[in-house]
Image: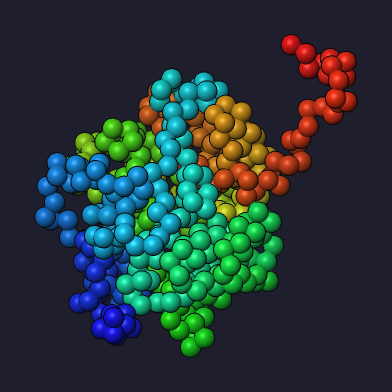
Amino acid sequence: MAAQTVASTTNSADTVDLGPAAALSCRECGHRVPLGPVFACEECFGPLEIAYDFSAYDTEELRKLIEAGPANIWRYAPLLPVPADVADKPNINPGWTKLVQADNLARELGVDAGKLFVKDDSGNPTHSFKDRVVAQALEAARAFGFTTLSCSSTGNLAGAVGAAAARAGFRSCVFIPHDLEQGKVVMAAVYGGELVGIEGNYDDVNRFCSELIGDPAGEGWGFVNVNLRPYYAEGSKTLAYEICEQLGWKLPDQLVVPIASGSQLTKIDKGLQELIKLGLVEDRPYKIFGAQAEGCSPVSVAYKAGHDVVRPQKPDTIAKSLAIGNPADGPYVLDIARRTGGAVEDVNDEQIVDAIKLLARTEGIFAETAGGVTVGVTRKLIENGLLDPTLTTVVLNTGDGLKTLDAVASDTGLTATIRPNLDSFREAGLAS
Ligand SMILES: *Cc1c(COP(=O)(O)O)cnc(C)c1O
Ligand SMILES: [Zn+2]
């Protein structure tokens, strides 16, 4: 016990067990450093990513191991920066969410029958995709001996951190813009951690957190999306793994992915590349399409202008979970959209609401505004001829409509109010 306490405060590269994770490597210059709670390259300030050693894996053995694993993201533990016994530790165990064959939606959008799928991540423990990335960051926090879990959040992340910290016995203190949707505030607060509203937008919150990390006031704190970002980001790879496994170990032809910071999209691409290299799926082309809200569309604007750099915007959209005006991974998203032959598109608030209602009415899936963005963008990409309606397409729904009720509340409601008798029912025109 005593030895463990010492190790947890003095963990170095030699004592950190994060499974196949071998080191951190700079995405820009390739400079490698030992695994630790750092996120920027000391040589060039580029983002650090996890580098793995997968050399010992046999494809068929790995496939069998995964298929025999738990029905959550830990079935992919051999491909993630987590210890081999991760499934036995207290965590929220997200993932293995439904891949819904969306034939009704396909008909409405003019996609061939059997070709359109919705990956519905509203089924995660706190009802958004963020549980995937937080579950990863929690394991890194444990490995590095942190006792407080924190983040800057547009809402969903705060809830996911609160829940994961509660389950694993960490203190949590999270920071959000003070004017978020009530559903997200309640969802973040209910787990009993500290929840701090910052007077400013998400980019202000993020800046504040970076300052706190460098200050003694934030010592011992693991910020899941700042100093633990390399580990956190890997959680998004599990979306790629699950989609392929659920398609029968096949790559989809096209994916439509929402963009906030762009981390999810870039790591979905990384996950697909790994599956190809490991021989778990056939090596053939796929296209990744990025989706933004018009009121916060810095990546889409850069894509359409043919730029390599992303000019920051001041967000103004109902899609608050995607409202990052200065997306850290924006340039990488541009690279991936261009390299794979995809595109980046945006839709306005009205189109987002229409798409939320379309998905609900056709497939019985109530998406949050981010899901309205991906479904709306899918429709627009088909109209523009950029997305091929004859090919297998997976559209991500990354959150639950119950958290963003306001987005649709004004134009949904009672069909009629009647007295409790049949005459009144008939008068209202409801009889069959
Ligand atoms: C955070 C989030 C995303 C994607 O975020 P990235 O920063 O691009 O990884 C997508 N959808 C929802 C609902 C989110 O909360
Ligand atoms: Zn570098």
Position in image of residue 350 (x %, y %): 68, 39
Q: 6 above or below 109? A: below
Q: How is the image coloured?
A: rainbow
Position in image of residue 278 (x %, y %): 18, 46
Residue drawn at the location 23% of the way across and 38% of the way down? 281
Front residue of 426/27: it is 426
Horizontally, is 325 left or right of 30 in the view? right
**Residue 91 placement: quadrant:** bottom left
Q: Quadrant of the C terminus?
A: top right
Front residue of 324/419: it is 419
- Looking at the image, can residue 389 be seen? yes
Q: 31 above or below 118? A: below
Residue drawn at the location 65% of the way across and 39% of the way down? 353
Residue drawn at the location 57% of the way across and 26% of the way down? 362
Give the mark count. 0
Position in image of residue 76 (x %, y %): 28, 50
Residue drawn at the location 52% of the way across and 71% of the way down? 172
Horizontally, is 248 left or right of 261 in the view? left
Residue lying furthest front in this view?
Answer: 1
Q: Quadrant of the N terminus?
A: bottom left
Horizontally, is 10 left or right of 218 in the view? left
Position in image of residue 28 (x %, y %): 31, 65
- Looking at the image, can residue 204 be seen? no
